[in-house]
Image (cartoon, coloured by chain):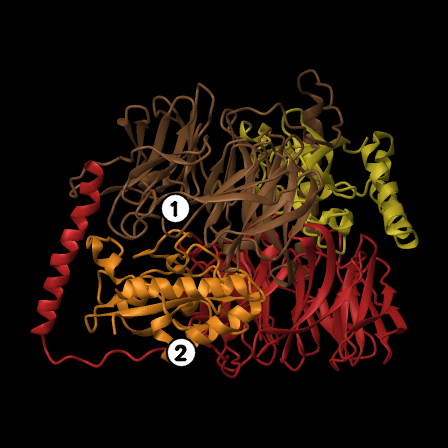
Chain colours: A brown, B red, C yellow, D orange
Amino acid sequence: MRFNKTLMQPAIIALSLAQAALLSGAWAAPVPAPLPAEHLSITQLPVASPHWIYVYDEAFNNETDSRLNLYDGDSHRLLGQIDSGYYPGFTPSPDGHTMAVATTYWARGGHGPHTDVIEFTDTSSLAITGEVVLAPTRAQGPPTSYNIAYSKDQRFIYSTNLTPAASMSVIDVEKKQVVADFDTDGCVLAIASLERRVSSICENGRLLSVTTDDTGHEVARSFSDPFFDVDHDPVFIQAAPSQQGALFLSFLGVVHPVDLSGMQPRFSAPWSLVDAKPVHHWRPGGTQMLALHKTLGTLYVSMHQGGEGTHKMGGSQIWVFDTNTHRRVARWPIDPAKYGAALAVQVSQDLQPLLFVTTDTSTLLILDGKTGHLLHAEAKMGQTPWYLINP
Amino acid sequence: MRFNKTLMQPAIIALSLAQAALLSGAWAAPVPAPLPAEHLSITQLPVASPHWIYVYDEAFNNETDSRLNLYDGDSHRLLGQIDSGYYPGFTPSPDGHTMAVATTYWARGGHGPHTDVIEFTDTSSLAITGEVVLAPTRAQGPPTSYNIAYSKDQRFIYSTNLTPAASMSVIDVEKKQVVADFDTDGCVLAIASLERRVSSICENGRLLSVTTDDTGHEVARSFSDPFFDVDHDPVFIQAAPSQQGALFLSFLGVVHPVDLSGMQPRFSAPWSLVDAKPVHHWRPGGTQMLALHKTLGTLYVSMHQGGEGTHKMGGSQIWVFDTNTHRRVARWPIDPAKYGAALAVQVSQDLQPLLFVTTDTSTLLILDGKTGHLLHAEAKMGQTPWYLINP
Amino acid sequence: MQQRIDRLLERASRRVAQRTSRRGFLGLFGAALTGATLLPLLPVSRGGQALAEPTSPKVPASPTASDDPVSCDYWKYCAIDGFLCACCGGSSSSCPPGTTPSPITWIGTCHNPGDGRDYIVSYNDCCGKTSCGACSCNRNEGEKPMYRLSLNNDANWCMANDNPNYHCSVSVLLGVAGQ
Amino acid sequence: MQQRIDRLLERASRRVAQRTSRRGFLGLFGAALTGATLLPLLPVSRGGQALAEPTSPKVPASPTASDDPVSCDYWKYCAIDGFLCACCGGSSSSCPPGTTPSPITWIGTCHNPGDGRDYIVSYNDCCGKTSCGACSCNRNEGEKPMYRLSLNNDANWCMANDNPNYHCSVSVLLGVAGQ
């Protein structure tokens, strides 16, 4: 009884409402044509823009499912996604047509046999075009621009290994296979220079530089002098690529420019972002604390106030420097209470640059790279957006 | 210059501070013995408690990484985790010693060839003890108690397939292999009864019941009469296991008791949770909207106010019924503004029952199952805790 | 009457599914869904059920929101469950780059407040990458449990794709309901 | 002086790593870390660096919190980075059921406010299940970049396990620093 009532009553309402709708529709204004049928399709990416950005989401609570989210800084839309597995290394190819992702997969999600692999994604279609299986020794570390590197002539990829013994694998991009391995004497990361040279940072503050031949094998190696003090003021591994090589930055805010354009690495005089007064305690920090506009020479650094052990802390200000004069030209506040603290910064390399900032509350901020004006704040950019890569 | 100052100043501070610390320590009270060295170990689970609960986290934003979190309702601690892959089915074995998880994995994280598999985890060690590879046809649906089922004698597992053609695979638990498959005429889910019978729900509101022999093959099948109205008031597939079979619940709040203890399914008279007055609009909803204490006969239902299309909406109240008298014995408010709306409910089966509730803001609430008193609220229980399983 | 015909046709196609190989069936069903001439093959519309109780709190309230394809309130999304592809690099009817549309779908009937008509909508999943994670949207007007598969939005509709990994969902207008 | 010796020993063990098979090396290193007699083999302590600048905002402020193993402020966690195993079914020095401890570790030196001593702490990862996700804790007193590997908490220290999947981290007291 009760059961029947519950079922019947809505049906009666439905009938009378349907009739009412029909009647009111019949007496309304001239009837527009029905909407045409739509066709299911697949979106094609437009021509790449320098204002696109890959936002790397480590997905720290579900770390086997990290991804690169491609985002348009002008339209404020996600454009697509490249799955990047577990603790990946990544780098766009020199010609920009390919995103190489070195990562780890398991036969059973997060268990069972695992495979290290470099996957190649066509950046115009976001489809995977091929892969190279690696030895299961790939370095699994934080995101940097230097976990893997294309040789400058795009023929090889250098991929860092850590077991914890450190070595380098050389992948022939055309043949799609590992063609060589060499020991790096404990030095890590892959910073490419010249045609086919790769440099690594050593525990004593030196650079190891290894030159490979056209089969990918080592033909020469050399160690530089130490260029920073590992014990007292180490450099972050999240250096910024520069026109001549890379700009390193230390925990205490000292810039170490490294020139890799010659036969031997050259180190310009270090200069500091902060003055010596310890009362300030402004320091760089985060997961990608610096970004460099290569042609304008503008350096952006995420800065916070804190002491020893705060080098991963997000910033409350972006400090802007002219790398030619070493002068600070601006301090742009980030509102940590509103947007979170600034973990990663990246700047587009065109002449109307956008500054991209991700925070520890997963917000992506877009600032005018010249004025610091906040143009857009995009919330919910994944779980843990810890790195930003220009296309 | 500037550079040197920055480096040196802290070192001076450090020295004086270290000296101060030594001095003050030397003049203090009697020196306690140093803490002993610890030994790294692996925690052993204690004897299982009826107050443990498996919280299924779909991890909807990273769906290849779902998991079952084992939680102790008394100590309010996580006890461990079973990885459950992508869109899993799961069921504890009748003896409670094993958790069976049917899931899908890819060779490359979320791409490449995929494998459907049932994995067996020892519930006393949370270690995987074996697996059976399935045909790649496993039904990938919402979490229910009936995606897979052990036969009552624990010899076989019935696993639902959907391609979208519906069928059932029979897995021999001892031989660890698929031993049979049979078509289910479009009917889905696996509800085990008798020794080796499995029932499925059909699109016309009937139950298909298939009996298998000791090789796992079908020996008999029968269709019941329709026991609910699919078009006007369908039952949720998240039924609650009862002593005789299962308690189904409809979108509009009608309870359909199904007795599977005989040779043919028997359907008791449906009864309604709500009175007929449509002004109330109280309805069940969520991802696991009902829980039954089998021996006490107490039914808990997550209820919200809403109309057509709200059957997945979380509840603002838990309604409590005596299934013997069909009387509502309590309404317990959940504070959605504080804890989120109640998506899933489960009750421990002991005589001092705990009612577990997960919400759409990932909070796990623990209520006294007799009084409704809120005993504990645990925040951050994963991304999307959509189902609760008794150990 | 239409309901009964659609139901019969749905059963027929499911029988085809059971009797042919998985891939052969997909080719057939996929073609049916991309060709407008095969509209009568679609399963039962949701219009009737959607009207059965008019007080759904999920019905789009604001006319502004209801035309925005990145809003869950968009009228075409009346029975969608998942991530909106319009937030993931696609559009309301287009899959993001590098993903593959599902050839099989669930079906809804949604009321367009702009012209007062009910439209049949095919909800396709886009497959082959892991969860997009943006614009999670769960609306269930006329949605039914998994035993009424063609009206169910819980099943993984990427199930029949080469890669059954769910990424996001689109809504594709097929035509006016009841024509 | 101690620093120099430790550095030498660390280099020696890394050379062993390079010259022996991966598994052979692990067995050796694993033994070193579970046997208290091999303490001098440990890499440089973090005590010196931790004192180098005393204004760290991450130093535990409240004596109450600093003894709670499910709190990120627990004094033993001064250089931990990841999920606290004490929140994941383990304890501050024990891996959760079904996971496997890493045989290789990074090292910290933490100040115990309870007895005023500095202790050498081994941070082991527990491996073999996906991210625990509970009690994410990131403290970096004396932590160094990856080229100073034994003082680095960013590297996946499950790297050498049969299953290199990171689940959570423990802190194991090895002894008083400088003894």
Where B223 sits versus C158, above or below?
below
* Front: mark 1 or 2: 1
- From the viewer's side, name the closer residue of B29 and D47: D47
Q: How crowded is mark 2: few (under 14 residues within 10 Å), some or many (20 or more)?
A: some
Question: Going by the image, does D159 lie left or right of A328?
Answer: right
Residue B257 % position (x, y)? 70, 70
Residue A62 % position (x, y)? 53, 55
Q: Which chain carries label 1?
A: A
Residue annotated with mark 2:
B39
- From this viewpoint, is residue D71 visible? no
Q: How far apart are marks 1 and 2 (CA)?
A: 37 Å
Which mark is drawn over residue B104? Answer: none
Quadrant where the C terminus of chain C sits is top right
Residue at the image position 17 percent from the left and 43 percent from the top: A278
- From the viewer's side, name the closer residue of A346 and A140: A140
Q: Disc 2 residue type?
A: His
- Give the farthest residue toward the left: B27
Q: Disc 1 residue type?
A: Arg
- From the viewer's side, name the closer residue of B136 and C134: B136
Residue A15 % position (x, y)? 71, 40
- From the viewer's side, name the closer residue of B41 and A325: A325
Residue annotated with mark 1:
A206
Residue at the image position 75 percent from the left and 77 percent from the top: B173
- From this viewpoint, is residue A164 visible? yes
Question: Going by the image, does B55 lie left or right of A37?
Answer: left
